[in-house]
Image: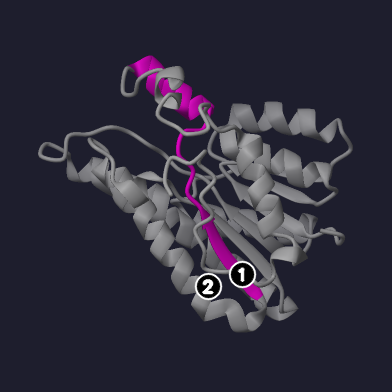
Amino acid sequence: MSKARVVIVTGGASGIGLGIVRMFAGNGHPVAMLDVDAQALERESAAIRKTGAKLLAQKVDVSNRGEMDAAYAAVRQQLGPIAIVIANAGISSSADFQTMSLTTWQRMLDVNLTGVFHTIQPALSDMVAAKWGRIVTISSQAAQSGAQDRAHYAASKAGVIGLTRSLAREFARHGITVNTIPPSLVDTPLAQAGVRSGQVPSLDVIAQMIPISRPGTPEDIAGAVEFLCSDKASYITGQDINVNGGTWM
């Protein structure tokens, strides 16, 4: 991308989101790093600002529309009109479907699916006005294959894929592309927490089932995001870009 454009990244203070923030900031784009973890925001934003990047860090829960609207107002005031949105924030947990509580089910949807709605909708006015925009959602390979003991997670991410395709059709005439990346195993703090809790095997064990026999990295995902948000990808929309080491083909 030759032109500096304002970027929003949710879940931007760790894991995949942090890798994406670092990539855009390193390429000279003004970036809004939104995350629910205030300590991680402070730590990571300070490190990125030392590189000279123009960065806005704001604590926000993507499931709370009021917080999101306030964050977007701050982005417009401090950075300018929004051109690129990366809807990355999400949660994951294991739960037996027969005994899953409605609260557990609803919280997963509130963050992983409704949170994406809150992330994309308020940015569209800027993109439509500019007749240019890039939206990338981070879904999951679990939405494609299903996931034992994580039906609520797989369902929420499948909703993200359906939303992505629908928005791609609706907003193509405005010069806006909308694509999704459904990663499989990525070495992130969230994945490591799952290993420590015993919910998933070690990453090395899981990696043995991947044709490219290693976990993905945030940089792997960020590289695909970079391309999808470039002018070179202007004819790509409504697609699942499977950055997964060959796990799902």
Any magenta on residue 180? yes
Any magenta on residue 13? no
**Amino acid type shown at disc 1:** Thr
The residue range painted magenta reads 176-197
Q: Residue at x 85, y 48 (%)?
A: 28
**Amino acid type shown at disc 2:** Ala
The answer to the question of whether label 2 and label 1 lie on touching residues, with beta carbons closer than 8 A, is yes
The answer, for residue 147, to whether it is visible in the render is: yes
Q: Is residue 146 left or right of residue 192?
A: left
* Residue 197 circle label: none
Say what secondary structure mark 2 lies in. helix
Count neighbours of disc 1 (C-alpha within 10 A) and say few if under 14, some if 14 to 19, many if 20 or more.
many
Question: Which residue is tagged 2?
Answer: 168
Q: Is residue 122 left or right of residue 106?
A: right
Q: Position of residue 132 (x, y in %)?
A: 71, 74
Pick the front one: 228 or 98: 228
* Residue 177 circle label: 1
Q: Residue at x 23, y 35 (%)?
A: 149
Say what secondary structure mark 1 lies in. strand
Q: Quadrant of residue 7?
A: bottom right
